[in-house]
Image (cartoon, helix red, strand yellow):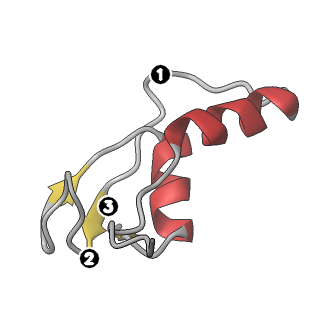
């Protein structure tokens, strides 16, 4: 059976990978981003301010772009 779901980010796997690398981060470290692709939780053009770790993952997957 073919997978017909939209590609979604695996947050649990992302956090496991960061824990394995001993990445430490601060809660207040935020990045201003604009969503460039519709997903289950985001709409194109939406402005968000996620945590640095989440923003890096969204940018890497092409869901968002960083706005200065």
Task: Return the residue nearer the eye: 15 or 33.
Answer: 15
Neighbour class for label 3 at 10 Å: few (<14), some, many (≥20)? many
Residue annotated with mark 1: 27
Q: Nearer the viewer, mark 2 or mark 1?
A: 2
Residue annotated with mark 2: 37
Q: Residue at x 24, y 64 (%)?
A: 39
Residues at badges 3 and 2 in contact (C-beta under 8 Å)? Answer: no
Q: Is residue 29 visible?
A: yes
Please identify the quadrant where the N terminus is shown.
bottom left
Neighbour class for label 2 at 10 Å: few (<14), some, many (≥20)? some
Image side of residue 7 versus residue 60, left or right? left
Q: Residue at x 43, y 70 (%)?
A: 3
Q: Is residue 38 above or below residue 53?
A: below
Q: Earlier in the sequence, mark 2 or mark 1?
A: 1
Image side of residue 49 versus residue 22, left or right? left
Residue 44 x/y as whole percent: 15, 74
């Amino acid at each position: 059976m073919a997978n017909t779901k939209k590609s979604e980010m695996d947050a649990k796997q992302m956090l496991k990978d960061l824990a394995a690398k001993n990445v430490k981060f601060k809660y207040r470290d935020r990045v201003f981003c604009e969503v460039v692709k519709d997903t289950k939780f985001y709409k194109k053009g939406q402005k968000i301010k996620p945590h640095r770790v989440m923003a890096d993952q969204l940018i890497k997957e092409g869901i968002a772009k960083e706005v200065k």
